[in-house]
Image (tube, rainbow, N blue to C red):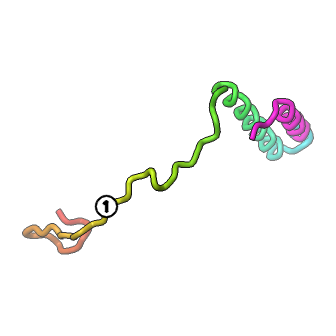
Amino acid sequence: MTVGHERVIAEIEKHARQARMGDSAKMRESLAAIRALCDLVLEGEQQPGARAPRAIPLSASPAPQPVLSEKKLEEDGANGDSLFEF
């Protein structure tokens, strides 16, 4: 879905009006929204042939190998099942 530049500019103008009328918290929120809208347009221009990311089918990824047997490492002087065995 592509958003037109005119629509983005209209949203920027709306947030600029809100920034002028609001207190400092509202102004910061509006300016952050303006920044996000500008980044959206500028990133779209940098990658003109870029498309939306596609999902990779699950069958294309290799299946995880099951663990057949679990052997514990046993050493002299170890503390059993402690995570801090040295």
Residue 28 x/y as whole percent = 78, 41
- Which residue is located at x 89 percent, y 38 percent? 14
**Seen in the image, is 5 located left or right of residue 69?**
right
Residue on which the image places disc 1: 65
Q: Quadrant of residue 18?
A: top right
Residue 51 x/y as whole percent = 64, 36
| Residue 67 in the image: above or below residue 37 | below
Please provide the residue range marked out in magenta. 1-18
Q: Quadrant of residue 29?
A: top right
Near-viewer residue (61 or 30): 61
Near-viewer residue (29 or 13): 13
* Residue 40 located within the stretch drawn in magenta: no
Residue 44 x/y as whole percent = 69, 30
Q: Residues within 10 Å of mark 1 (few under 14, many from 20)?
A: few
| Residue 63 in the image: above or below residue 25 | below
Give SS at disc 1. Answer: loop
Kind of residue at disc 1: Gln
